[in-house]
Amino acid sequence: MKKQSPIIGIVFWSLVSVLTLFPIYWLFVISVKPAVQLFSTPELILSDPYWGNYAKVWGDRLLRSYMLNSVIISTGNAVLCTVLGFFACYALSRFNMSGKESIFFWTITNRMAPPAVFLLPLFLLMTQVYAVGDWNLLDTRIGMILVYCTFNLPFAIWTLRPTLDGIPKELDEAAYVDGASAWKVITEIVFPLCRPGLAVTLILTWVFAWNEYLLAATLTNFNARTLTTGLSEYVTSTGTEWGIMATISVFTLIPALIVFGLVQKHIVAGLTFGAVKG
Amino acid sequence: MQSKTLGWILLAPTLLILFFFGVLPFIYVVFVSFHQWNPFAVDPEMVFNGADNFRQIVFDPAFLNSIGVTVLFVLFAVVSELILGYVLAQAFMRDFPGKAIFRTIHTLPLIMAPIIVGSVWKLMTTPSIGIIPKFLDDWFGITMNIATSAPAAFATVVIMDIWHWTPLVTLTLIAALVSLPSDPFEQAQIDGANKRQIFWHITLPMIAPAVVATVFIRLMDALRTVDEVWMLTGGGPGSATRFVGVHIFKEVFPKTNYGYGSTISVVVLYLTIVACWLLYVTMLAPRSKKD
């Protein structure tokens, strides 16, 4: 590769960054405006920020419980999908099971379903079928964790499959010859080798679950309500409280930012959805 | 190798969860798709009407229009994302000061919820309060109104999608580029190949699986997208941004036409699976077999 002056790179990336950051900056600008100023002529530069929205959102106990629900549901779902996806991929990659390639493709079709009409059957199943006595799955965190598997588990399987296929089978075979149990091979030999792929899967499924809206809006009322649905509660018939909405959005962004920042460096190493590394 | 039983045991939890939360609802939707039904009516009675819904769908201009708009949207958005993502991924292959920071910034849109992205873009583009129409008017004298102009609304949705999803493409392509061996490139340079030849004959074929995988995942998600577009334009003006996902949503909720909405979903799901399956067997599967 040719050597290039670093200035060009910096200028280029600064430009890209400004375009990338602008909508996020604008979200922040809206969040520090009092409601009356929202409909005045927009100004690019922020002057005299108003922190009332933040105080209001932070003081809202309901929103704090939504935040906790969001954290529990997306973390639970991401861990569940990554672990089950890993087991499934190990099975698909190592055993000669009949129809395994069809099963592999079938899993991803679960992610393709247009969500709108699936809300009602899920609602009916969760209230009437998946119920024991008075207790049912609707509006529970565990229910949402399981429902989110429909789109995250296939994604996890498709992201992890190339990683597992890339680990030579001879490695497990050698361990079996040495007398290791299957559990030991899976957890102590294969699992650590998959770390980059697992990290990417974990973070992306976490983000997808954290950001999901439609299912959460229909399948939760109060106990398991998530932050994204809390947002929509400010879109009312009398008008939308954009300032509050933007503030909640900023709050929604922060945890995602932290989680994402933690695994930044793994992301590139393990991102091979459905494709095999060259 | 061990008995296959262990394989099935490892696969079982996945199959069970997907059966109870994916297959059972799907069977229900297929069942409803043969009925006329409004579950929100005072007297919600399901009326069996055979294949009428499926017959209706073939000649339904609103549905065909939504398919057309969606295909256009996927074409514009995914092609732009691929080109932009490739340029950015290549740029990230060089070293320059602050690379880690710039990469973090570039991936930020990826972590935003679709519903939030839709709201922000709505706030930026709504006439009179949005900054973008004001800017276009002040500097170029262009009037932009996404509430009345179909091309403006469509373009805004496409740009929003590019903004939101290009980072995913960039990351996937960086992953592919990083793993490329360097020998073919050195050999090509010795043989005197120019940049364009190297791109078409070496780089592109080698990153093709990653490109196809990206198209696959973006296609799949674009066909079911609702939140972002619903928030930004509500499918309007007219039917300019009424993509299939939004179309089904409108059919089911505001129009309470649940039976017909189910029919559309079944057909759309079928078309998506066929399109993705073709892409998969022709482009992805043979390559992984070779490995």
Image (tube, rainbow, N blue to C red):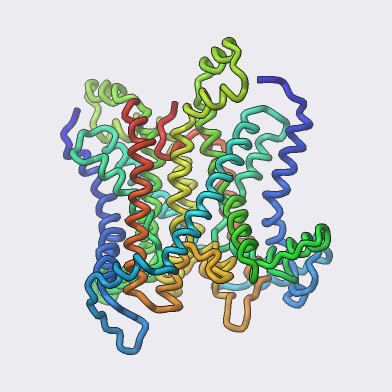
Q: Is residue B190 visible?
A: yes
Total of numbered circles in the picture? Answer: 0
From the viewer's perspective, is A89 left or right of B161?
left
Percent across and percent down for residue A90 are: 30, 37
Relative placement, left or right, of B227 versus B270 is right
Q: Quadrant of the C terminus of chain B?
A: top left
At horizontal 34% and vertical 89% (from top left) the residue drawn is B42
Residue B4 in the figure: left or right of residue A108 = left
Residue B218 drawn at (x, y percent):
48, 48
Residue A128 spot, x, y in % from top left: 26, 74
Residue found at the very far top of the displayed protein: B190
Q: Quadrant of the N terminus of chain B?
A: top left
Q: In this orientation, does residue A131 appear?
A: no
Q: In the rendering, at what x and y percent does residue A71 appear? A: 49, 58
Q: Looking at the picture, tell me which residue is in the foreground, B90 or A146.
A: B90
User: Residue B267 falls in which quadrant of the image?
Assistant: bottom left
Single out the residue that lies furthest toward the front: B59
Q: Is residue B240 left or right of residue A58?
A: left
